[in-house]
């Protein structure tokens, strides 16, 4: 935990005696050689029981415990949000992702459920390609909908509100959540199936909306949107 706060360029530097790098707490707790030996042999599972195709098998026990601790650590507020995150990873990895718009661009992709009020992580899914551990919904909502169903398991039918971006948001998903007593709000692609026909062009400050008894679609153009 302290290494994450006290950044150095290499692992050996935490035990350096150089006056410019010296941080005595690390050597007081454990010698460098002992730390490296423990790190080298750190292991969480029995290889004889490995599940074929499970790319996270060797750390699955740790992930399960971490997720449980996240869920139990706080009383959740009403508003939740699902978003993607990219954890920097420079080593070799079969499911390493490249996302041009992210800060690090290369790394491990996460789908994360947050509490809006506190930014606290409630649950997460590590993307491993076709073997990603997601559960199908009652209806076919595609991969993005399945991710929502997986992360919201245990949070439905409690009157919460979920915020999403346009990769997740759809009329089918909003209908599914509403039936499970969960509100939803988010940007949406106009090409999504079932979307109403809104104007293609709006004047600055103009707003258009269409609604049913359960849903509201709004399109507007403000000064910020004009310069995007």
Image (spheres, rainbow, N blue to C red):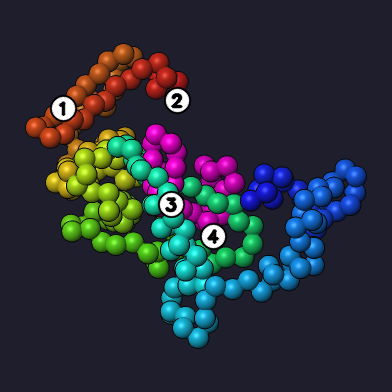
**Residue 110 higher or lower than 119, as above or below:** below
Q: Nearer the viewer, mark 3 or mark 4?
A: 3
Look at mark 2 in the image and give the residue it sits on: 228
Q: Measure the alpha-carbon separation of dots 2 and 4.
A: 30 Å
The foreground one among 228 and 218 is 218
What residue sits 48% from the left and 47% below the top? 85
The Cα atoms of the two marked residues, 3 and 4, are separated by: 24 Å
| Residue under label 1 | 210
Q: Which residues are magenta?
A: 97-123
Q: In the figure, residue 128 lies in which quadrant?
A: bottom left
| Left or right: where 167 falls relative to 128 | left
The crowding category of the residue bearing disc 2, from other C-alpha atoms within 10 Å (few below 14, some 14 to 19, many at least 20), is few
Whether tag 1 and tag 4 are in contact, CB under 8 A, the answer is no
Residue underneath mark 3:
70
**Residue pushed farthest left?**
213
Neighbour class for label 1 at 10 Å: few (<14), some, many (≥20)?
A: few
Report, in whole angstroms, how far the alpha carbon at label 1 lies from the one at label 4. 41 Å
Q: Which residue is mark 4?
A: 96
Q: Nearer the viewer, residue 65 or 166?
A: 65
Q: Position of residue 4 (x, y in %)?
A: 65, 48
User: Do we see residue 193 in this rendering?
Assistant: no
- Measuring 52% from the left and 42% from the top, which residue is drawn there? 101
SS type, badge 3? helix
């Amino acid at each position: 935990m302290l290494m994450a706060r006290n950044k150095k360029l290499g692992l050996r530097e935490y035990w350096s005696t150089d006056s410019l790098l010296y941080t005595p707490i690390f050597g007081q707790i454990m010698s460098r050689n002992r730390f490296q030996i423990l790190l080298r042999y750190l292991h969480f599972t029995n290889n004889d029981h490995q599940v074929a195709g499970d790319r996270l098998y060797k750390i699955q026990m740790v992930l399960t415990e971490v997720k449980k601790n996240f869920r139990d650590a706080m009383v959740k507020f009403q508003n939740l949000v699902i978003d993607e995150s990219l954890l920097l990873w420079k080593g070799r990895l079969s499911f390493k992702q490249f996302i041009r718009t992210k800060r690090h661009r290369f790394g491990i992709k996460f789908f994360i459920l947050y509490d809006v009020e506190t930014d606290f992580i409630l649950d997460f899914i590590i993307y491993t390609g076709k073997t990603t551990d997601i559960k199908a919904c009652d209806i076919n909502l595609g991969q993005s909908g399945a991710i929502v169903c997986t992360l919201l398991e245990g949070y439905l039918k409690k009157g919460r509100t979920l915020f999403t971006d346009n990769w997740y948001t759809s009329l089918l998903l909003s209908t599914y959540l509403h039936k499970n007593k969960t509100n939803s709000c988010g940007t949406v692609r106009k090409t999504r199936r079932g979307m109403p026909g809104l104007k293609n062009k709006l004047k600055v400050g103009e707003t258009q909306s269409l609604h049913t008894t359960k849903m509201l679609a709004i399109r507007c153009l403000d000064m910020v949107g004009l310069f995007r």
